[in-house]
Image: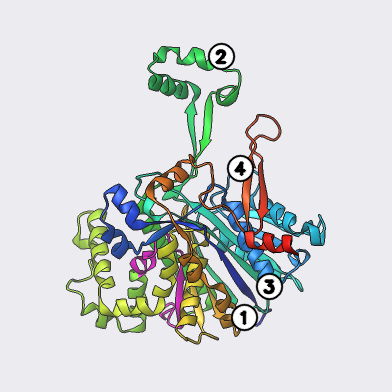
Amino acid sequence: MSTTTQVGIDDISVYVPQLYLPISTLAEARNLEYAKLNKGLGLEAMSVPDAHEDVATMAANAVLDLLRRNELRPQQIGRIYMGTESSVDGSKPMASYVLDMLTQYYEADYGRDCLLNCDVVDLTFACIGAVDALQNTLDWVRGGTDRIGIVVGSDNARYELESGGEYTQGAGAVAMLVRQNPGLLVVDSNWGVASRSVHDFFKPLRTYTKAQITTEVLAAAGYPASDAQSITDQAAEGLLSHPDHRVEIHRDTPVFDGPYSNACYQQRIGEALQHYACQAGVAAAAPVADDWHRLIFHLPYAYQARRMYSELYMQESQKRGDWARTAALIDMDWPEREAFDTDAAYEKAKAGYLRAVTKTERYRRFVEEKIEKGERASSLVGNLYTSSIFLSLVSTLEADLQEGRELTGTTLGFFAYGSGSKSKVFTATVAAGWRERAQRWQLMQQLQQRRELDYATYERLHRGLQQQSVAEPEGSFFLKSVEQTEGVRQGARSYGWREHKAELQEAKQA
């Protein structure tokens, strides 16, 4: 551990929407084999935002819970840095809306300027944005005295209906309190990084000519396409009225190549681990992660880590000198490139060998000890994009607490990934106050209290057709409105706070 000032995560808060869709319900609607999703990918349920929720409300709810639980005044918070890839604005950060909601909540007690000097910004790099925000905030906290920062990841991992990613969806936010001498995790200053520009998963601006749009509408209405250009030229207001030839449309559903993204994930975490070893002074021939008590991963689906880590497991075992014990359990030899005519054939053989590694008893025991606890919440929530690695952290620590494990002084290894693509590998030491903090989270209890959706309601929410909230907000922030009229306020989002009904009743009686 570095001899410089100890900084890290002091506490964590998780906000998950109150609605969920069982994966079995989706499988039935899509005519998919549930066992493949459940046993193969570890999926049980996905969190679904209600009509009044977006990434900003989820983030604000997580941050408020963190502030209240730790009895912090808003003036003590120097920054709120937010990781998200679900922003609904190309300029104004979602973190500024979080600031607005928190100001509304605290204004009566602390004044309108209670968060005036709080720095806010969004960081976007697919699923690794909140990790970037954490690294940046750790450096900021280390550089001063009495600095307190909050890092929050918030996303709605939304895919097209009937797409290959639909069953991995999820939504929620995780907020972390970052300060010196933290009670939960002390984060080491050595970080491994690996970045390459690829197109494994991205959300481009889709462009369409105005004539294309008009032609499509006319065809759907049964009119001749020849009228398209003249109608487009006459448009006086709305979508087609601006002078640009093309219309740019942003959709929050991605363009993605699942197998390629998995390959990028696997390559980047290996490269980042190698870079981490250099930063930490680990000899090239020595295993890197032997002393890491638990491994915490970004989980786009619950079983991603156990499926992707097999090659690193093999490499670490080879450095340790005990790989022969595992290799003896595999009924095939490691494929050599020169034995294959094409790269594709070689990669297929290599993937087959690594799948065989994951089925060995030794690897299964490794997963059970190092990885499995972090999968439990992901199975019930789904992909949280920027928050998923931190949901895995909370899931791991809460499980170890319930099982009576003592983690103080142990090392956790983190494998973060963001498509596009980048990985970061870092470590943290569990602090003496971890049990006290983990006892307050009650994540699994929260998940048990959610409301189950039927498929029809899920689809209405997904399509944006559900105008009324399925479960009215209570004790939470909510989206009140989005300005629709053209002008200087077009698209402006307004938010509010609603108390619990029981608290309102108590206030009336008082």
Q: Residues within 10 Å of mark 2 (few under 14, many from 20)?
A: few
Q: Which residue is mark 3?
A: 70
Give, as a single range, the part of the protein colored magenta. Answer: 284-309
Q: Which residue is mark 2?
A: 234
Q: Residues within 10 Å of mark 3 (few under 14, many from 20)?
A: few
Looking at the picture, which amino acid does disc 2 mark? Gln
Looking at the picture, which amino acid does disc 4 mark? Gly
Foreground residue among 448 and 301: 448
Q: CA distance from mark 1 to mark 4?
A: 39 Å
The local secondary structure at tag 3 comes to loop
Foreground label between 3 and 4: 3
Q: Is residue 425 visible?
A: no
* The C terminus, quarter of image: bottom right
Q: Which residue is mark 1?
A: 2
Q: CA distance from mark 2 to mark 3?
A: 59 Å
Foreground label between 2 and 1: 2
From the viewer's perspective, is residue 467 above or below residue 246? below
Which residue lies most toward the left here? 331
Q: CA distance from mark 2 to mark 1?
A: 67 Å
Foreground residue among 42 and 69: 69
Q: CA distance from mark 2 to mark 4?
A: 29 Å
Which callout, 2 or 3, points at the residue further toward the start of the chain? 3
- The image quarter in which residue 505 lies: bottom right
Looking at the picture, which amino acid does disc 1 mark? Ser
Looking at the picture, which amino acid does disc 3 mark? Asn
Q: Which mark is residue 90?
A: 4
Is residue 381 on the magenta stretch?
no
